[in-house]
Image: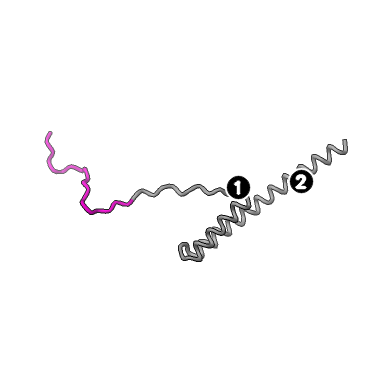
Amino acid sequence: MAGNGNSKKKQAIEGEVIPASPSPPARIRLSTVRDCRREMAKLFTEARHGKLPTAEAGRLIWMLQAIVGVIRDSEWEKRIAALEAASDKDNQ
């Protein structure tokens, strides 16, 4: 069958800018307090230079502070468990 001109195939127009598909954001390591501090500093710098709205930076930093709290609690739990295990070992 010959084409009747109603083909749905799109043709590129010379000079047309086609936006690139966005790549997924880079994975950010947030497994230590140091990782979180580094990310907070990056957000602060971006907000300071106007690359990120300050409200957005503040919201993200607030979330990072919550993550830091969880990391510290986890570290305390590990230390307490180790002390209790050592104490139990000494008492036997």
Q: For the point 21% across and 51% down, which residue is it?
A: 13
Q: Residue 74 appears at what percent x and percent y? A: 68, 47
Q: Viewer-proximal residue, 74 or 48?
A: 48
Q: Residues within 10 Å of mark 1 (few under 14, many from 20)?
A: few
Vertical arrangement, residue 7 with respect to residue 66, above or below? above
Q: Residue 42 appears at what percent x and percent y? A: 53, 58
Q: Who comes first in sequence, dot 2 or dot 1? A: 1
* Residue hosting label 2: 80
Q: CA distance from mark 2 to mark 1?
A: 20 Å
Amino acid type of the residue that numbered disc 1 sits on in the rendered structure: Ser
Q: Is residue 16 one of those drawn in magenta?
A: yes
Q: Residues within 10 Å of mark 2 (few under 14, many from 20)?
A: few
Name the chief secondary structure element in magenta. loop
- Say if mark 2 contacts mark 1, CB within 8 Å: no
SS label for mark 1: loop
Q: For the point 59% across and 53% down, which residue is it?
A: 36
Nearest to viewer (mark 2 / mark 1) = 1
* Residue hosting label 1: 31
SS label for mark 2: helix
Left or right of residue 22, residue 66 in this image: right
Residue furthest top in the image? 1
* Residue 90's disc number: none
Q: Is residue 66 one of those drawn in magenta?
A: no
Q: Which range is magenta? A: 1-19
